[in-house]
Structures are given as structure tokens and as C-alpha cells.
Amino acid sequence: MLGRQKRGYDMERKIVCLKSTDAADSLKDQIEGAGWQIDVTERIDTARVLIDEQQPWVGLIEFSKDHLNGQGRKLEQLMRSTPGMGWIGLADSELVPALFENKLIPGFLYDYHTLPLDPVRLIHSLGHVYGMVRVVHDRRESETQSAGSHGLVGISPVMEQVMRDIRKIALVDAPIMLSGESGTGKELAALAIHRESERRYGPFLVVNCGALPAELIQSALFGHEKGAFTGAHRRHIGRIEAAHGGTIFLDEIGDLPIDLQVNLLRFLQESTIERVGGTETVPVNVRVIAASHIDLRDAVQKGRFREDLYYRLHVLQLHMPPLRDRQSDVDVLAHHFFAAFAAERNSNVRGYSPDALDAMRAYHWPGNV
């Protein structure tokens, strides 16, 4: 057993390496210098003991010709019994075709490297596999406990600030205006605010103002009485009233017709609504979170959005940054969605190639996520 844990290691940044030659030993110092604890053994049974003791997230296997026969079956059993680990293979190039044929590489490995090893590339690969396994572990944890991010994914400083702002904003029961390009996660941010607020046990309803026909928006928001118009055979409770005690998220509010903006302003001022075709004033206790991908100040100047409604909605503000301004989140998002899709489809695909990750990092992401 080599390489005891040193001060400063993350508890998960441990590696168990099953070696066949001295190639792994020669890289031990460089791997530990990159912040890893590594234990190396030649025996599969010892590797299993180390895994039980150390609970590593990453494993290295140096393949030999013995792994193409009975030893390969033992190796397969080891990898099947460690679903919480990401395995990386090391092999002579002449062994690679056979390792693909018997499914040891495509069936169980996140990545593989041919000998002689490039230590820089291997350490780079260790980081990628560690990140992907961490996403899987975090995803499992989030299924059993409340996650502080509420579905928002990111580790960049700008996203950490967004999450801090969400927790602060949630404490103030007032209208909120979310801004940001399409695909930046405005609806997720609205849901996070709701879940962090005192209204968390009430409903959270979403209305996309740009997706509803103009003639249906008023009824959808405020409801209608029986007989209010042709086809109104019974009373309909609108989304604002249905959200009583909770939060309503009005997405693309910049697309709301100017005449309906008056009704929304009245609701924000008085906390009451009137159903279409009715005379009853209905008190409603709802927090409004609105969002738009267009510049509402510009819309006000052009007469397409009411100035008084603009200020009524902008009591609190939160801007969602585009993905191009949070490049350090690209890998995290890629691993997050990969883990989700792989679990959904029960896929044997292990991850992204280094070239695929490089391409994603270089992309401008005009549509965000």
C-alpha cells in the first residue's frame, strides 16, 4: 500500500490503482503532486479491500494480457461492484482492440490511455472523471435532501453570487424582476426564490405571457365567470387566484398587451382581482416574480410597456448571467446533463472525450442552456 493521506487532500480525491507493471509507480509522485492520494496494488482482492477502506471516487487499472482471460472476469466483477467510482484504463496500444472487443473499455471505463503514459494528460483525465463522478454523487444526495441551489447548477463566482442574492431576496415578500437572456435559468431562479421564501408551502405557478394568444391572456391570468363569453360554460379560476398563498412567475412579461398591463398593475397595487364577466372583487395574496429577455426600460421609452408597472415590478431585481460569462460552469453543466441523461436512458456511455469538452469550452453558447 502506497501513499497515505496527506493534509490538504479532499476526502474524495483518492485513487486506487491496480497495476501490472511499474508504470503507475513511476507516476505516483506527479499524481500526488497534483493533489491526489493514491494507493497502488497488483492484486484485485487487495484493491477491493482498499476501495472498502478508502472509498475512492476514481480508480486506475493497468491492463495486461492476463486481463483478456480469467483475470478479466475478476476485474469485471470488481468494476461492477463499485458503481460509485469512475475507472480509467492504462494499456499498451496492442491490447486496446481486444479490450474493446471483450467490453472492458466501453462497458466500464470513463477514459483510457495508452502506454507510454503522458502524465499531464492523465492528470487532466483524473480531474474530468472526478468531476463527472462528483456530479453523480451530488445528484444522488439531492434526491434525499434539499439542495441549496434548487436546480441551479454552477460553481463560478458569478453563480455563487446569484445564489447568495436569491437567499437574500427570498426573505423580502415583494415583487421581483428577473432579467437575462433566454436560457439563463430565470424560471429556475424564480422557483429557488419561492422555495427559500416563507411561501414555500404555497403553490408555484408559471405563466408564459408570450406563449398565450392575446384573447386568452386575461382569462388565463384573472379567470372568468360562467357566461362571460361564448364557450364560458362554467366559472374558471385564473392563475393569479390559483396561486393564492404562493408565488406566480410571469415569464416574458414584456409581451403582455398594454391594455392588460393596467389590470396587472391594479392587482399589484390592491392585491385584488376581478374575473372576466364578474363584478366581485376577489382578494388574492400572491407574490409576483416577473421576467423578460428584452430591455423593459427600452420598451417603456418606446411606449410598449407601462412605466408605472415597470417600477412596481422592480422592487427587487436579479440578473441571470449568460453562459459565456461563466465559462467555469461549462464542464459542470456538461457533466450534470450527462449524468441526468445517462441515468434516464440507462446508458453505458461513460462520458465526454477531451476533444468534446474542449469544443464545449470554446463555444460561444448564444442560446445558453
Image (tube, rainbow, N blue to C red):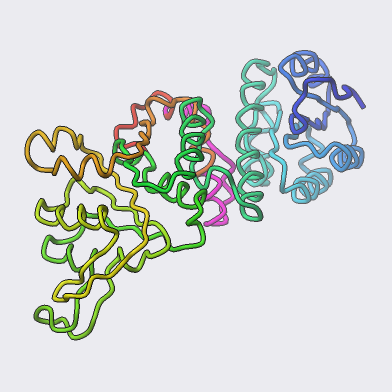
Is residue 151 or residue 303 the one in the foreground?
A: 303
Direction from residue 102 to residue 259 in the image, left or right? left
Direction from residue 40 to residue 366 in the image, left or right? left
- The x and y percentages for residue 37 are 80, 24
Vertical arrangement, residue 170 with respect to residue 277, above or below: above
Q: Which residue is drawn at 37% across and 31% down?
A: 321
Direction from residue 312 to residue 304 in the image, left or right? left
- The x and y percentages for residue 356 are 46, 31
Is residue 126 or residue 205 the one in the foreground?
A: 205
Does the magenta portion include 318?
A: no
Vertical arrangement, residue 127 with respect to residue 226, above or below: above
Is residue 120 or residue 240 the one in the foreground?
A: 240
Q: Which residue is drawn at 66% across and 55% down?
A: 144
Q: In which quarter of the image is the C terminus?
A: top left
- The x and y percentages for residue 140 are 65, 50
The boundaries of the magenta stretch are: 338-359
Is residue 186 or residue 345 the one in the foreground?
A: 186
